[in-house]
Image (tube, helix red, strand yellow):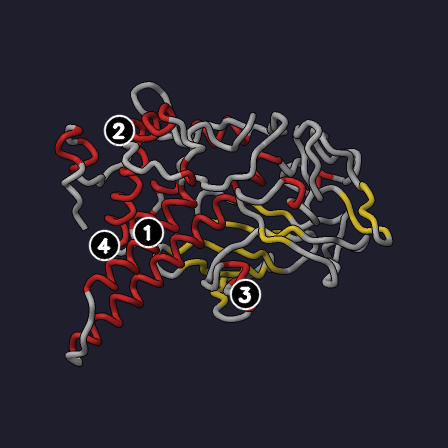
Amino acid sequence: FISPRSPRAIYFNDDTYVGWVQGSSLMEISTNDPKLGAAFYTVRMSPSKPRFQRQLYNCLACHATTMTQGVPGHTVRSVMPKPDGTMDVQRKSYVTDHTSPLSERWGGWFVTGQQGDMDHLGNAFLRGNELATFVQNNRPDLRHELYTDDWLTPHSDIVALMVLEHQTQMQNTFTVANFSVRRRMYESEQATQRQDAVSKDELEYAIDQAAKKVVDYMLFVNEAPITSEVKSSTTFETDFTARGPTDSSGRSLRDFNLRDRLFEYPCSYLIYSPAFDSLEPRLRQAIYWQLWRVLAENVKSDEYAHLSSNSRRVILEILQTTKSGLPDYWNEDDNAKEGSQQK
């Protein structure tokens, strides 16, 4: 069913993904469960009796592997496709997130919109040992290549793809951190009941390490640079930004940059998501503490050098205005903050 002339379509919002293949009797749905990670479903599209069914095992063969950081999750892959649309398993493939060089992205995907002179692997398939262009880059839509009336849109928006890539691995990072902390807390509790010697410092260290991985990804550490301005081929850019929330100055973590990086204020909008709010309280408090220390410029590490003083200040101000449940020290005067850590 899936081929360059009949591509699979992916539709998504902040937590749910729908996969549709023309001519298939099934529609695939997956969602990010705040406690479990990715949960998978199918809809059998019978006109007389459609059936919605939870998929427990089959999907996890691909969606609980190293590609999803070892937990039930979502992933965006970049592969080397053959002319029939299948991937060449003998060639290298990539799991894509915001750290991936654009030159390694979108193999096996159509890409519409503007990316200037930046190269990528999309819109092409293998012909012998070389990638042959199927659709020219910087195209507004796919109408000249496909009969696009069979899909909801003639686009495969480059900005939507970049958001999708960040979002899937951010959700996986939440799940990995939550699973690891819950496991360590359980092991610590069991050891205490057995009266084994347990170091409280070991548990705190594990929580802090899990929190740091979340904070680093959330703040776009090691984000691949954009070297040419990127432009959407649809209204996705404006629609996504309009969802906010915004502070009193109209600024939002959903504001795009698209000149040298994805977002204007590099802190993930998924901090507003149920997945973040459902993290183990001790983990969430550790994330808040580490995040505040970076934004308040109490951490001078080179890994956060991409965040200017102005960017840190604006992100801090946006969160102070728009994020509920922040610890009190986020809004205390500067002299009181550093001694206010609460976990």
Which picture quadrant has residue 264? top left
Q: CA distance from mark 1 to mark 3?
A: 28 Å
Residue 217 seen in this snapshot? yes
What residue sits right under mark 3 in the picture? 59
In this rendering, which labeled residue sits more in front, label 3 or label 4? 4
In this rendering, which labeled residue sits more in front, label 1 or label 2? 1
Type of amino acid under label 1:
Ala
Residue 282 location (% of width, % of height): 23, 54
Type of amino acid under label 3:
Cys
Q: Which SS class for mark 4?
A: helix
183 up-or-down from 119: above or below = below
Residue 301 location (% of width, % of height): 37, 39
Q: Earlier along the polypeptide chain: callout 1 or callout 4?
A: 1
| Dot 3 crowding, Cα within 10 Å, few <14, some 14–19, many 20+ | some
Q: Earlier along the polypeptide chain: callout 3 or callout 2?
A: 3
Residue 268 seen in this snapshot? no
Which picture quadrant has residue 196? bottom left
What residue sits right under mark 1 in the picture? 211
What residue sits right under mark 4 in the picture? 282
In this rendering, which labeled residue sits more in front, label 2 or label 4? 4
In this rendering, which labeled residue sits more in front, label 1 or label 3? 1
What residue sits right under mark 2 in the picture? 321
The residue closer to the viewer here, 190 or 113, is: 190
The residue closer to the viewer here, 331 or 62, is: 331
Decide if residue 281 is on the left or right side of residue 31.
Answer: left
Q: CA distance from mark 1 to mark 4?
A: 10 Å
Decide if residue 118 is on the left or right side of residue 283.
Answer: right
> Outermost residue, top direction?
249
